[in-house]
Amino acid sequence: MTVVALLGLVAAGLVLCLLLFLFAKVELARLSRRSENETRQLHDMIEALRRSFAEIELTVRDIEERTGVLVPPTPPPSGLNLTTRAQALRMLRRGETPDRIAAALQVPENEIRLLEKVQQLAAGQASRADAADRHGPRREAPATNS
């Protein structure tokens, strides 16, 4: 092979490398523009979502102001239904302790203690009412004018 042929092959190889470089650069520019467009679209979508969220937030605030009161959460169910309450009262009258009653009925001890206090208060008011009925209505002392 001659030197001219070798130089021709090297030149052809360099031209091919240059063409590949240019095609790669063009493809890279095209992909860059495409990703910029997609990024711009995503930013536009995010901004639209932010505006929508802000509108929804304003609407919710407006509705809350109109109602003035939020719905309170439902209270947790009590462990004392009527049957359990009646059993607890019977056990209290028999003299059992609140901790034993709570364990037997599987309810919180503080509910049994509260039931005991309410029962004591109700019994105190009932005895006062009975005493007032027995003694008749209270009479006020006549006012003296001096």
Image (tube, helix red, strand yellow):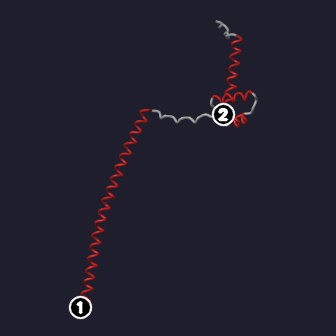
Question: Where does label 1 land, which residue?
Answer: 4
Neighbor class of circle 1 (other Cα within 10 Å; few <14, some 14-19, many 20+) is few
Residue 32 at x, y percent in the picture: 31, 65
Residue 43 at x, y percent in the picture: 34, 55
58 shown above or below 7: above
Q: Nearer the viewer, residue 112 or 1?
A: 1
Residue 108 numbered tag: none
Q: Quadrant of residue 145?
A: top right
Q: Quadrant of the C terminus?
A: top right
Q: Quadrant of residue 27?
A: bottom left
Question: Where does label 2 land, which residue?
Answer: 111
Amino acid beneath label 1: Val
10 shown above or below 72: below
Q: Nearer the viewer, residue 43 or 8?
A: 8
Residue 29 at x, y percent in the picture: 29, 67
Give the side of residue 114 with respect to residue 96, left or right.
left
**Marker count (numbered):** 2
Residue 116 seen anywhere in this rendered image of the structure: no
Q: Which residue is depicted at the point 67% across and 23% down?
A: 122
Amino acid beneath label 2: Glu
